[in-house]
Amino acid sequence: MAKAALKKRGAFLAKAAENVRICDEHYRLTLRLPAFPPSRPGQFIQLLCREPGGQVSLREVDWSEGRPPKFTQPELTDAQPLLRRPLSLAGRRDLAGGGVDLDVIYRVVGTGTRWLSTVKAGASLSVLGPLGNGFAIRDERPQAAIVGGGVGIPPMLYLAEALAAAGKQAAAFCGAKRASLLPVTVKAGGKALPSGKPTPCVKEFAANGIEAVVATDDGSLGFKGFISAAFERWLDEQRVGGDDLVVYCCGPAEMMRAAGDMCIARGIECQLALERHMACGMGTCQSCNVRIRDGGAPAGRGWSYKLCCTDGPVFDAREVIW
């Protein structure tokens, strides 16, 4: 396994060290591996949501006109899907005695994640990664803002550790539809203020010296409304410029577009970790395309396609065409 740790990426067999429910519909899975290549916040893994090593039998199915086909293959009828699922890295710990722990936080939304929620500690899981390009931390800019919505929050936990290690002054913004869907821990006695003012209220960010704003659509915790609105209020109050600040964002497309537009209007760099449906995660299937501004595109079109999995998932907000 020593050689595998030096690869840029690879396929690895991991053990589930922990798989715990952290809020409604969300789980934190800790994967323990003997070794894993160097990784960065913003990168992801492709996780096989079925028992590794199982045989998948593919065969032709008759499809008569006017009659729907009848599928019997386990990968189509059972709760163990054929394709891997892309999951952002929410944290990494290189263990003193050797080995690596990787954290992923996922929401149960379909067959693959539903199967994953049943995994017990000690179970074996097939991991492909690390994949994609991560966030860039700018040495020359002392401040950072982290904006995450829903399942876009987990990669920000990994990023918070890297920003703290780089000595950056940061603020975090966490959004969810309601308090019970927030995949972070609000500290006992900590106050997520309705005003949208950052406080040390989120345990995971406070551990890295980062104050946070919590926003819920229904007002059940913290700021009532979209996290993009709370972030815009903070931007206006701080009056920080593009020479000092970098914004990092992941979550629903509407939220990322709003945050990106705010930053573009203010001349602030904004890095977006985009989400797309992926089959392979390595650029083979070409399914996760993103339209990116490109002055060198043929016929003066002004844009070209890039792949979220290999060219991203992190893109500059100024490049993305929504």
Image (cartoon, rainbow, N blue to C red):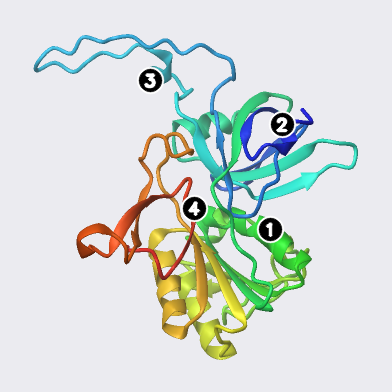
Badge 4 density bin: few <14, some 14–19, many ≥20, Cα 10 Å: many
Which mark, by number, is residue 4? 2
Q: How many numbered circles does the render carry?
A: 4
Query: How far apart, in angstroms, are the residues tagged by discs 4 and 2?
Result: 24 Å
Q: Position of residue 259 (x, y in %)?
A: 45, 72
Give, as a three-letter code, the residue at label 4.
Answer: Pro
- Answer above or below: position of 201 versus 280: below
Query: How far apart, in angstroms, are the residues tagged by discs 3 and 1?
Result: 37 Å
Query: Which secondary structure lies at badge 2?
Result: helix
Residue carrying label 1: 185
Residue carrying label 4: 313
* Sequence-wise first label, 1 or 2: 2
Q: Position of residue 59 (x, y in %)?
A: 33, 9
User: Which one is closest to the eye, mark 3 or mark 2?
Assistant: 2
User: Which one is closest to the eye, mark 4 or mark 2?
Assistant: 2
Quarter of image, res 122: top right
Give, as a three-letter code, the residue at label 3.
Answer: Leu
Query: Which secondary structure lies at badge 1?
Result: loop
- Answer above or below: position of 86 versus 273: above
Q: Position of residue 118 (x, y in %)?
A: 60, 29
